[in-house]
Image (cartoon, rainbow, N blue to C red):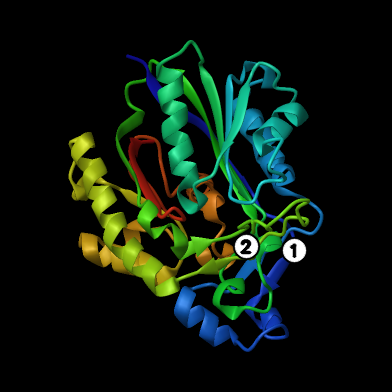
Amino acid sequence: MQNIKIISTASYTPPQVVTNNELTTLMDTSDEWIKSRTGISQRCISQDENTSGLAFKVAKQLLQKALVSADKVDLIIIATMSPDAYTPSTAAIVQGLLGAGNAIAFDISAACTGFVYAYNIAELMLRSSEMRTAMIIGAEVLSKLIDWHDRNTAVLFGDGAGGVLLQKSEDKTSGTLGQHWQTFGQLSNKIIAGQTNIAPGFPKDKTSLTTFSMAGRDVYRFATHEVPNSIKQAMKTAHVNLNVIDHFLLHQANVRIIRQIAKELNQPLTKFPINIDKYGNTAAASEPILLAECVNAGVVKRGEIIALSGFGGGLSVSTIILKY
């Protein structure tokens, strides 16, 4: 059976940087308060690019780095909780911009777990079909869903996109070793954004969307319990133990969550790359941005084993153990 290999990684964040100090003009907060509770120093905010624009920049990089033409892409999946519109899908927009006319394109909505879910879906589709090449992108413009005067949420989030190009390969030294994914729908009210309120009667009033809300303490407890469990479940399917994993690339939600997960797994924090200080929480874009940065910096090298784990809205969690 052919392996599914990552042949390129890429990321893009908007040029405008908003520091913690700038947020103090909008709400009662401070740089020290934000850093001590989240590990965030700044975040990137899109000015005139929507989610498809960020994703398109990543898509072009992925093809250029892999020397693959757009017509060779068979599948495009974009994970996002902040799409351009209900329809068309952000993936369809990107497919059109790329000129990737042979690609099936669709979005998935699983918030901060979205990229890892999309990766799993793409791999299953490649293995069960004649398709050969898949583009997986996590992309978010969360700034359009934020109440910028609510310090409980506004300090946390940023905009960005990241992705991978996957391809069937005879190379047995790379590929997915194991995976785990799970949804906890009974906790679906713990993270909400863009909720539609249904007006009574007919004709209906114009639909309005809610801004971001989150039960922070509940999400913290969920993440620090369920992410270690997900990693352990994925390792069972991969038939590996914790000590052989070179890097744990986790969703960048909060530095305290990452530290606690490292403690729960009894693994050194040096195995857990962190970039939340620069970008904040970019939801589905978080893990692929981190992966692309680690690959570019030589932190993640060919042949190393990584645990890629996302967690968040749904509530949901997913982990992939792969040999890069």
Q: Is residue 48 left or right of residue 19?
A: right
Give the mark nearer the N terminus: 2 vs 1: 1
Nearest the viewer among 52 and 171 is 52
Question: In the image as oriented, which residue stretches furthest toward the top?
Answer: 130
User: Which residue corresponds to the image point at 69% horizontal and 71% vertical from the top-left?
Assistant: 18
The location of residue 67, given as percent across then percent down, is 63, 23
Q: Quadrant of the N terminus?
A: top left
Q: Which of 299 and 234 is in front in this view?
A: 234
Q: Which residue is drawn at 44% across and 53% down?
A: 314
**Which quadrant of the rendered structure holds the C terminus?**
top left
Residue 16 percent across, percent down from the top left: 74, 63
Query: Label 1: which residue?
Result: 16
User: Farthest residue toward the front?
Assistant: 201
Check disc 1: other Cα within 10 Å, few if <14, some if 14-19, many if 20+. few
Q: Residues within 10 Å of mark 2 (few under 14, many from 20)?
A: many
The residue to which callout 2 is attached is 158
Residue at image coords 82%, 54%? 48
**Residue flagged by tag 1: what amino acid is it?**
Gln
Element class at badge 2: loop
The residue at the point 53 percent across, 80 percent down is 34
Residue 92, above or below 193: above
Left or right: where does residue 236 sit relative to residue 66?
left
